[in-house]
């Protein structure tokens, strides 16, 4: 990122810093928002970096877009169209939802764009960000789409990315996709008990979403209660203990997930 863009990002961050400080009562001076000069510089930054292949540049698109939209002048009527296009181009179609008050979450459809040209461009970019699970469509980031495609084509995959990258969500969707197609069991190993409730809640939500009423989520293993329609969410200790009860404790596994493997 060149020096000009660093200056623009610094100015945007300073606007947010001052506004938050004012709201918290840390400062009481008059707050200067985003003026037209900063608006034009920000648009140039977002437009340019949204075309970059560098991950840091594209993440900066999200940061700049979020600040610009949060503290925008209500008279900037074309801003939503521009930001939706830029975020979609940068591979962050799901982030476009934050600037669309009329987004249709049930069908993953954005409200209409004023420019038919931009509408076509956004649609083309978002086609690359769609995945289908059963009859449902999900908008994902470019990174999540790459994970999805890898999971469909390799037997063993290691994923390293920040917590906010959305790894767990796309892995969960792939698990649902596999049991919709093939039935069978899912084994999801986590490093600590504190994560059990979150993973169980996430699976419960999607099981209901897809009407998979014949599946049961288990957080312990019992060799006398075996079924081919189970989602096992286990700590590594409970997963290992399952092998003391049965030589093959988890038959017909569709996917095995080891979360935070560095901690196991």
Image: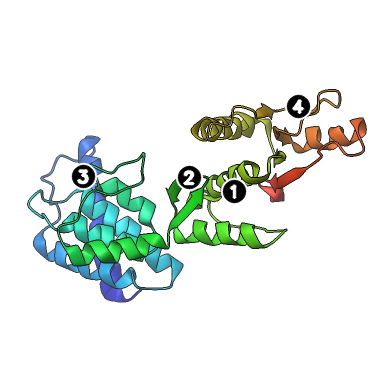
Q: Earlier in the sequence, mark 1 or mark 2?
A: 2
> Which label is found at residue 220?
4
Instruction: Choose mark 2 or mark 4, whichever is in front.
Output: 2
Task: Give the percent coordinates (x, y) of residue 246.
Answer: 91, 33
First in sequence: mark 3 vs mark 4: 3
Q: Nearer the viewer, mark 2 or mark 3?
A: 2
Disc 2 + disc 4, Cβ < 8 Å: no
Kindly report the distance in space between the C-alpha atoms of the residues bearing marks 1 and 4. 23 Å
> What crowding class fits label 2: few (fewer than 14 Cα within 10 Å), some (14-19), or many (20 or more)?
few
Residue situated in front as seen by the camera: 151 or 34:
151
Q: Residue at x 30, y 75 (%)?
A: 3
Work out how far the residue at label 2 is from the one at label 3, CA to CA, in angstroms.
44 Å
Quote the CA–CA distance across marks 3 and 1. Answer: 41 Å
* CB-based contact (under 8 Å), mark 1 and mark 4: no
Label ID, residue 135: 2
Relative to 72, residue 128 above or below: below
Question: Counting residues from the N terminus, which is met first, the one under dot 3 or under dot 1?
Answer: 3
Left or right: 74, with 111 as reference point: left
According to the image, label 1 marks what residue?
A: 174
Residue 261 position, x and y percent, is: 70, 49
Report the Cα–Cα distance between label 2 and label 4: 32 Å
| Mark 2 residue element | loop
Identify the residue position indicated by label 3 in the image.
Answer: 19
Circles 2, 3 touching at the beta carbon (< 8 Å): no
């Amino acid at each position: 990122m060149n020096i000009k863009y660093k200056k623009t990002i610094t100015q945007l961050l300073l606007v947010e810093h001052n506004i938050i400080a004012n709201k918290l009562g840390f400062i009481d001076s008059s707050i200067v928002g985003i003026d037209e000069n900063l608006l034009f510089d920000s648009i140039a930054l977002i437009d340019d970096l949204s075309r970059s292949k560098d991950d840091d540049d594209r993440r900066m698109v999200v940061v700049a877009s979020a600040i610009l939209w949060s503290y925008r002048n209500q008279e900037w009527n074309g801003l939503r169209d521009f930001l939706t296009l830029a975020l979609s181009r940068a591979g962050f179609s799901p982030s476009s939802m934050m600037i669309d008050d009329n987004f249709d979450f049930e069908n993953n459809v954005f409200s209409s764009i004023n420019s038919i040209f931009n509408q076509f461009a956004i649609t083309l970019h978002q086609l690359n960000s769609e995945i289908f699970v059963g009859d449902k469509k999900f908008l994902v980031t470019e990174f999540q789409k790459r994970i999805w495609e890898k999971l469909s084509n390799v037997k063993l995959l290691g994923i390293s990315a920040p917590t906010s990258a959305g790894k767990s969500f796309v892995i969960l969707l792939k698990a649902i996709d596999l049991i919709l197609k093939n039935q069978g069991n899912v084994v999801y190993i986590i490093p600590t008990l504190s994560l059990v409730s979150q993973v169980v809640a996430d699976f419960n939500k999607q099981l209901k979403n897809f009407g998979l009423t014949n599946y049961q989520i288990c957080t312990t293993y019992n060799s006398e209660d075996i079924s081919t329609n189970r989602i096992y969410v286990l700590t590594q200790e409970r997963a290992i203990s399952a092998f003391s009860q049965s030589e093959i404790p988890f038959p017909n596994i569709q996917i095995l997930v080891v979360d935070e493997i560095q901690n196991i």
